[in-house]
Amino acid sequence: MTTQAVNKKDSHKLGMRASENIYQTIICFLLALLAATMVLPFLYVIVISFTDASVYESGTFYLWPQKWSTEAYSLILKGQGFLNALKATVFITFVGTPINVIANAGLAYMLSKDDLPGRKMINRLVMFTMLFGAGMIPNFIIMRNLGLINSWFANILPSTCGAWTVMVMKSFFSELPRDLEEAAEIDGCGTFRMFVQIILPLSLAMLATFTLFAFVSYWNCYFSAIIYLTDTSKQPLQVYLSKIVLSTDISEVVDMDSDLKNKVPQEVMRMACLVVVVLPILVIYPFMQKYFAKGVMVGAVKG
């Protein structure tokens, strides 16, 4: 190969490398802009929630509080309305999440068994619920006949099993080696013990993912709470937050006798309430994010 050909080849490689660097720079810039559109609004909410009333009323925008104040948080966290809403949300979330995961995993594991009597019919029924729903009125009648109106379980039980979740879990369980189950059966392991001691430990990534999905769903419970919970003392945080955000006079929602009501601007109160409600999800997500791709995509490639 002549020197001219080598130089031409090296020049071509350098050109390709330069083009790749430019492409990567443009992609990183666009992703940074996209991230800014998501981060800056939430940063603005946090800044306003910690901003002193005198600074906020001046109308000057800052990306960092010029004068810190926690009066809004003090007013919200000590209010009886917030404490009742927090108790409702904690109960719905921490009772509903394990029920949801256990019910979905149990049904999915059952449907992954080829020798299950009526397996095809049950599969069709599960898929039917994905395509068709009874509607709001029939669901309300069912909850009323079950005596669950004004009960937190009215927000838990209807969301216990989801067709999509069951199908993904079923596909995951179907891909697990059958040799493990056969070896366990030879050693005298029953179905329940096999499911608890062998199948579930092998499915931790998937279970962690769907646990987070269920946690977020129950924590953000709103529409069903409006329908089934008429007692305001039993309504969860999302309903309480909507009242804070939409109310023209927050003092009607925050039932606390304090001079702080006249000192803290309503917009600062709204931002502080938003931060309090969203904070648990923001804390949990970074620790669970690594399970997303592995937990959901494994098993989703098989029908």
Image: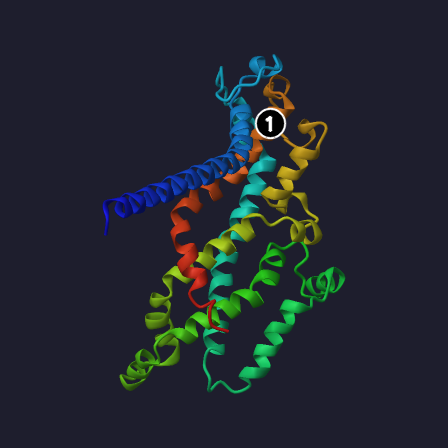
Relative placement, left or right, of 31 versus 154 is left
User: In the current view of this chain or complex, which residue is farthest to the right?
Assistant: 137
Name the side, left or right, on which 189 lies relative to 30. left
Image check: 161 left or right of 172? right
- Measured as percent of width and height from the top left, residue 220 is found at 57, 48
Q: Is residue 144 above or below residue 248?
A: below
Q: Position of residue 90 (x, y in %)?
A: 51, 47
On screen, residue 193 versus residue 80, left or right, reads: left
Q: Residue at x 46, y 84 (%)?
A: 114
Quadrant hosting residue 184: bottom left
Badge 1: how crowded within 10 Å, few (<14), some, or many (20+)? many
Q: Nearer the viewer, residue 94 or 8?
A: 8
Residue 20 lies, in percent from the top left, at 39, 43
Above/below status of 274 relative to 154: above
| Up/down of 121 relative to 207, above or below | below
What is the number of callouts on the image? 1
Q: Which residue is depicted at the point 55% across and 65% down? A: 164
Instruction: Name the residue at 61% across, 30% down.
Output: 270
Q: How is the image coloured?
A: rainbow
Dividing the picture into quadrants, the one containing residue 174 is: bottom left
Foreground residue among 204 and 171: 171
**Along the line of sight, which residue is nearer the eye, 43 or 25?**
25
Residue 122 x %, y %: 58, 79
Q: Is residue 203 visible?
A: yes
Q: Which residue is mark 1?
A: 269
Say what amino acid the circle numbered 1 marks: Met
Residue 78 seen: no
User: Considering the numbered disc 1 on the image, is that residue within a helix, a strand or a loop?
Assistant: helix
